[in-house]
Amino acid sequence: MSGIVIVGTGGMGREAAAWIADAGRGDSVLGFLDDDPGTHGTEVAGLPVLGGREWLAADAQGDVEVVVALGGPAARAGFVGHLDALDRRLATVVHPSASIGPRCEVGQGAIICPGAVLTCDVTLGRAVIVNYGAMMGHDGVLGDAVFVAPGAHLAGNVTVRTQADVGIGASVIQGVTVGERAVVGAGAVVIRDVAPDSTVVGVPARPIRGGAS
């Protein structure tokens, strides 16, 4: 068996199915996977829910590719680790309306949503999500499983480390580093480095959990 399966039947999973279709690969989508047994055997967005993660362990599934459409960075990273243990391949989804400039590197399993912009010399890790209308400037780096929400603007030379979450409409000025597993709140304006495992909100952004670097 070959084709694409999408992990997660929530909003991100349904959006991913639509974006794969927009990219001309809709016929290759076999269905969804979800660890909620109540979803198994049902249909979501016209596609079957095939089972949970155990479905991937069966040899009969062959050379399937997997889109991990889970919004939470920790959940996404955890499922990617499960796929690595099974030696399953991640599928990368790039919507045709996204703009990806020269010398950008998009890691395996990334989801680049409609209207997203990577200007030039941007490096994305594995299983990153750059949501619709988000922009990342030159020489930016996103670590594995980072989530960049809709309408977020990251200026040049911004680094967002593994499993961090940049909220909807947030702005990050040039040269700033957002630490591992940090959360940047919706609409925040980040003008200084954000410490790992902290949450920052407001204009300018200030910590409400953990501390700023």
Image: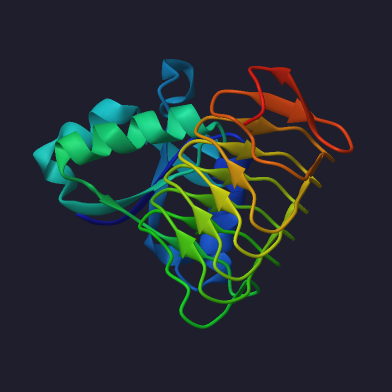
How is the rendered protein coloured? rainbow
Looking at the image, residue 114 sits to the left or right of residue 20; the answer is: right
Residue 138 in which image quadrant = bottom right
Hey, which residue is sitting farthest right in the picture?
A: 203
Query: Is 31 located above or below residue 81 in the figure?
Result: below
Compared to residue 189, the image places residue 211 above or below, namely above
> Foreground: 20 or 46?
20
Res 42 seen here: no
Name the side, left or right, on which 42 lies relative to 108: right
Q: Residue furthest left?
A: 59
Q: Position of residue 96 (x, y in %)?
A: 59, 75
Which residue: 16% across, 37% down? 86
Give how far across and how far down residue 59 sits, in percent: 10, 40
The answer to whether residue 145 shows anywhere in this view is yes
Relative horizontal placement of residue 1, taking residue 37 as reference (left or right) = left
Q: Quadrant of the N terminus?
A: bottom left
Q: For the point 51% across and 37% down, which residue is it?
A: 43
Using the image, determine if residue 151 lies above or below residue 118.
Answer: above
Q: Give percent across and percent down for residue 121.
A: 51, 74
* Residue 95 occupies quadrant: bottom right
Q: Nearer the viewer, residue 87 or 37?
A: 87
Q: Which residue is farthest bottom?
A: 102
Q: Residue at x 55, y 31 (%)?
A: 72
Total numbered labels placed on residues in the image:
0
Q: Position of residue 108 (x, y in %)?
A: 35, 57
* Occupied quadrant, residue 165: top right
On the rendered image, what quadrant is the C terminus found in?
A: top right
Looking at the image, which residue is at 49% across and 46% down? 47
